[in-house]
Amino acid sequence: MIISDFLISIVLFIILLFIYLKINNHDFLYNLIKITLILNFSTFYFYLIITKTFDIKLHLPIHLCYLTELGILISLILKTKRFYPILALNSLGGGITGLTNSNLMEGSSLIEYVHLYLSHFNLLLFFIIIFKEKLFISKINFIKSIILNALFFFGAIIFNYFFKSNYWFTNNKPPGENLTIILPDWPYYLLGLIIIGMISYFLTFKLLYKNKT
């Protein structure tokens, strides 16, 4: 990760730490994340459309983190917490990974960098909110979330097959400065990513399972 990326990530982590330690007004936090979510999606896709740079192989919210972010926005708009368990399980590890690793190709536009950082900031902000609310995740929630994510994963494989894309990085390592540099080539890096994801999932589950009353 280049120095500028590192500094941006540090600043965002500091902001998130401040929010966690100092802001306990849940209504304010929900309003804040609604604004950042809507701002992120609207500016990103509006820019891609007006500049005619939208690419179905790159810009659909199919990657797990962007899919989770979209799920958070839909849940907030519909005022439902039904999918909070899977969204929470995806958010902590995904947010940390996204702010410490880049999967953008060299020469990516500024709006793509903004989208990357703001998306993963939103994931961690959401996790902070539900953690403050003491969301409890049961073992059944945990298992259902794994199954649902597995379905999304295989859906991405099918989509990639037909459109020659690389969502969920099922065909190639993600570009940019990220941890896959130290992982072996296909398909072993993919297995490594799945193992890392499962560890993150389990640790997040254990953290939220403690909220059981």
Image: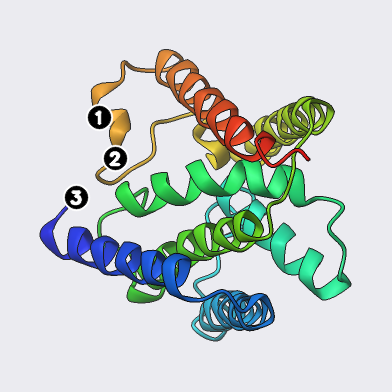
Residue at disc 1, secondary structure: helix
Disc marking residue 207: none
Residues at badges 2 and 1 in contact (C-beta under 8 Å)? Answer: yes
Image x and y of residue 180, in percent: 32, 30
Name the residue type under label 3.
Met
| Residue position for label 2 | 178
Image x and y of residue 204, in percent: 57, 36
The residue positioned 40% from the left and 75% from the top of the image is 111
Q: CA–CA distance between discs 2 and 3? A: 7 Å
N-term-proximal mark, 2 vs 3? 3
Q: Is residue 211 left or right of residue 76?
A: left
Residues at badges 2 and 3 in contact (C-beta under 8 Å)? Answer: no
Q: Residues within 10 Å of mark 2 (few under 14, many from 20)?
A: some
Residue at disc 2, secondary structure: loop
Name the residue type under label 1.
Ile
Name the residue type under label 2.
Asn
| Residue position for label 1 | 181
Disc marking residue 1: 3
Q: Is residue 177 above or below residue 67?
A: above
